[in-house]
Amino acid sequence: MRISNLLHFTENHRFTVYRGFALSALDLKMLSMIYQPMIGAMAISVYTTLYHQIAADRAGYSPLEQQRKLFLALGVDPGENGRKLFIEQTSRLEAVGLLASSRKFAPRSEDYIYEYVLSAPLAPGEFFRNQHLLLLLRDKVGKHLALHLGKELAEPQPEELRDAGGESLSVPFYELFRLNTRVIDHELEQAFCEAAPSRPEAPALNAATHAFHYSDIITRFPRGSRNRSHVEGLKYRQDELARINFISRKYNLTLQETCRLLDEDDIFFEDGSLRFDLLQHKANLFFRQQRKRQDELELGVLRAAEAKPAAVPGPGEEKPVEMAYYLEVPDLFRDQGDIHQYNAFLRNEPYTLVLQKFFPNGRVPDGVLNIFEKIDLQYRLNEEVINVLIHYIHAGRRSWSKASIETVAADMLGKQISTYEQAVQYVREQLEYRSKASASKRAAGTRGARGGKQKPSIPMIRQEQPDTPLTEEELAQIREKAKRLDGNVK
C-alpha cells in the first residue's frame, strides 16, 4: 500500500472489504504452509481479519467501519508505529496477489474511504507454475522443502495416463439445454443486477472498468491459431495482460476485436512476448476506421441529434493524485465533477477519452487527433503527461493549432517531463509566467496613457539662421572666391 502521508491513513478513516469467494480446506492449507513462510504470520493474520469482516457463507462488501476496528482486532497500536506496521503487512499481501487496496473519495463526507479487495490463494498447480512466487518460496524455506510441499499439496497424474492420447467427451451447455431467449424478463435481470455485487471476480486489473481477464480471452481465441500457445502464456504474464487491457480501453476495443488483433501475424515475438508497439499501432488504425464509420453513420442518420455531454468519470484506483498537485477544474466541467474526480480522471484515463471531453459532443477534429497521435506514438510522451498538456491548452487559452500543440509538447520533451507531478508543476510555471507577462504589458500601457516617458527623447538637428546679414564687402569676397574655384574646376 502506497501511503505518502500517514495523516491520510488513520484509525478514523472508514474502510470496506470485498471478497467474492470462500476459503476451502485446501485454501487454508495453502495459506498456512505456502504463503505464511513467504510473507509472515502477521500478514496472514491481517488477511484472515479482513476475510472475516464478511460472513463466511456470503460474498460481497462489508459494511463501512472505522479502521480502528481492524487495529483493535490485530492488537496494533493505532498510532504512527501501528499504521506503519499495518501498511507494511498489507503491502506484503499485495505483493503476492492476495490483496488489492485502493482509496476513494466520498463527496458526502468529504473524506477518503479505503477499499480492501481480497483474492483467493492460488491452487497448488497454479502456484508452482508461477516462477517469481516459486523462487520466493525457495529463498524462504529452501529448495528441498519447496519440492516436498509441491508433492504434498498436489497428487501426481497416474503413470499410464502421462503419454496416453485422448479426446474430449464433454457435452457443451447448448447441446443439452435449450433456453427460451424470445422472452426477456427485464424485472428478473434488474433484480439480479441490483442484488449481485458490482465487482469483478479477479480485481488484479481494477484500474480498467472493462478489464478482460485471461479466461475471457482464451475462451474466445481460435484454437487453431498459430498464436494460441502465446496467448495461453498470458496466464503467467499478468503485466502483459494489464497492458493489453489498457490498449483495449484506450482505443475502445471489444473483447472480440482484442482477440482479433492478438491473432494477427507477427504480433508476438518468437519467445512468446507481445509486441506492444505493433499492437498499439494496429489498435490505433482500427480505432480510426471505427471512428470514420461512426462519423458517416451519425451524419447520415442522426444529423440533427445532439448527445448530452458525459460527466467526468470518478477517481481512478491505480494512481491517486496528491492534493498538492491538484489542477483547477475548468468551467467546462464545473457541473460534471469535483476537483478530486477531475484530477483522477486526468491521471488515469487514456488521452483519447480525455480529448473527447474538451470538444462538443466528443467530436475531436481529425487534425487535432493526428497531432496527439504523433505525440503519443512517435514522441512517446507518457499518457498522464499528455492529459495535463490537453488541460494546459484549454486552461491557458492556447490555440489548438498544430504549431501551438507541438511547441508545448517539444518543450515538455526537452525538459524531460515524464510524470503527472512534473507536468502539473510545468503548467503552473507556464501559467504564472504568462500572467506576469500580461500584467507587465498592461502596466506599460497604463504608464503610456498617463503621459509617462515610453521612449528616450532623441535630439534633432536644426538649421540655424544667422543673426545679422552679410555686408557688401563680405559678399564681394565670397563672389571672388567662387570665381577662383570655378576657374580651377574648369
Image: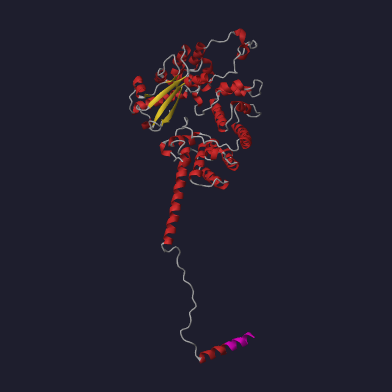
Q: Which residues are magenta?
A: 482-490
Is residue 38 covered in magenta? no
* Left or right of 239 on screen, residue 166: right
Determine the residue positioned at 55% across, 10% down: 156
* Left or right of 260 on screen, residue 127: left
Q: Nearer the viewer, residue 456 or 195?
A: 195
Determine the residue positioned at 48% across, 83% down: 466
Total numbered labels placed on residues in the image:
0
Q: Position of residue 351 (x, y in %)?
A: 54, 37
Q: Position of residue 4 (x, y in %)?
A: 40, 33
Query: Where 465 falls versus 144 (above or below)?
Result: below
Q: Main secondary structure of the magenta part?
A: helix
Image quarter where the N terminus lies is top left
Q: Nearer the viewer, residue 308 or 379?
A: 308
Q: Position of residue 454 (x, y in %)?
A: 44, 62
Q: Is residue 72 visible?
A: yes
Query: Where 57 falls versus 241 (above or below)?
Result: above
